[in-house]
Image: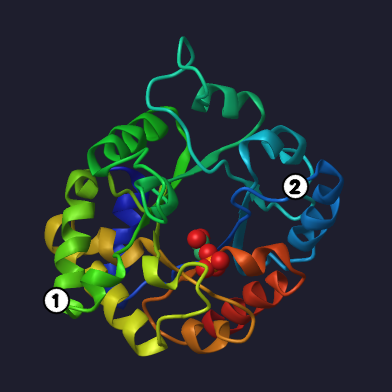
Amino acid sequence: LSPQRWLVGVLHLFYGIIARRPVVGGNWKCNPDSMSKLDGLIANINDCDTSQCDVYFCPSPLHVAYCSDKTTNGAKCTPQNCNFTGCGAYTGEMAVEQMKDLGLSQVLIGHSERRGEFGIFPMDDNNSLATKLKYIQDAGMSCVYCIGEPLSIREKGLEAVLAEMHVQLTPIYSLLDPSSVVIAYEPVWAIGTGVTATPEDAQATHKGIRDLIAKHASAETAEAIRIQYGGSANAANAPDLSAQPDIDGFLVGGASLKPEFKEIVAAISKAKA
Ligand code: PGA
C-alpha cells in the first residue's frame, strides 16, 4: 500500500468523502494553423488562476516542443497521444521518453477522435490504450484517459451507456491510480456539436462511472479519482455542470481556443471551494 493510498483510505474512513482538486484541460486538437498564433493561445492558459484548480493544455504534436516551457502558472503541457513502447523504429510516433526530455509529465490518450469517431479510422482501441496507460505509468508520468459513448448508445439510455463505460474501463480498472490518472468522460455526441449533456445527465453518468470503479477497482480509488466532463463545455454551462458532485473538471475543446477558457477554470474553482 503506497503512503498516498493509505492516506486516502484513512480520509475515506473518517470523513466519508475526500475533496478532489478540480482539473480543467484545454484540447487544442489540430489547431492553430500557424505557430504565430501560439503565444496568444498560451496567454489564455497563463490567464487562468490555478490556485484551486489543476490546468493543462494539449497542443498539436508539432507545437508541443514550443509550448513545453511557456506557462507561468503551473499549467501542464500535455501531448494528445503517445506510443506504447519507447523510442525506436516507429514512424510518426511520439514516445514518453521524448516527452520527459522536454520536461513534460503528463499525456492524454483515448480521445474519441483517435478511437475512430468522426469518420477517421481507429488509431486506438480499449486494449491498445490500456497498454499505453501502463507504459505511461511505468515511465512515471500521469495520464488523462478519455472515454465516452456515441449517440447510438446514448439513445438506448443510461444503462446502455454505463455498460459501454464498463467495456471501455475493463482493461484499465487495475491501473486506475488517482495520483496518476484523470478520467475524461466525453460523450461523443456532445463533442464539437454545441450540444452539451444536461447537468443531470452528466452527473448521472459520472456517478455511474464512479460506481463502476468502486465495484471493479476499489471504493477508495472511486472516491479519489477525478472525472472530467467534456463535450461543448464553455463559460456559460460550466457553472451548472460544476455544481454536480461527481463532475471534477472539464476537458474543453473549442472554448479552450478562446479567452473564456479562464472563466471555466474560475467556475469550477468557485463551485468546489
Ligand atoms: P469540444 O471538444 O469542447 O469542442 O466539444 C471537447 C473535446 O473533444 O475534448
Amino acid bearing label 1: Glu
Q: Is residue 185 visible?
A: yes
* Residue ID at (50%, 82%): 242
- The image shows residue 4, relative to residue 254, as above or below, that is above
Q: Is residue 157 above or below residue 217?
A: below
Residue at the far front: name it: 119
Identified at 24% across, 46% down, the residue is 172
The residue at which mark 1 appears reads as: 159
Q: Residues within 10 Å of mark 2 (few under 14, many from 20)?
A: few
> Is the shortest distance between ligand 1 and the CB of mark 1 under 8 Å?
no
Residue 220 is labelled as none
Q: Quadrant of residue 234?
A: bottom right
Residue projecting furthest to the top: 89
For residue 44, side relative to residue 203 (left or right):
right
Give how far across and how far down residue 67 sits, in percent: 74, 41
Q: Amino acid at mark 2?
A: Asp
Give the spatial CA distance, label 2 vs label 1.
Answer: 41 Å
Q: Is residue 100 left or right of residue 14?
A: right
Q: Position of residue 213 (x, y in %)?
A: 21, 61
Q: Nearer the viewer, residue 219 or 96?
A: 96
Q: Work out whether residue 251 can be spotted.
A: no
Judge the density around disc 1: few (<14), some (14-19), many (≥20) Cα neighbours within 10 Å.
few
Residue at horizontal 56 percent and vertical 87 percent from the top: 239
**In the rendered image of this protein, does residue 49 appear above or below residue 235?**
above
Give how far across and how far down residue 146 sits, in percent. 39, 54
Q: Which mark is residue 33?
A: 2
In the image, residue 14 sits, relative to residue 237, either above or below, namely above
Please, what secondary structure does the residue beneath circle 2 have? loop
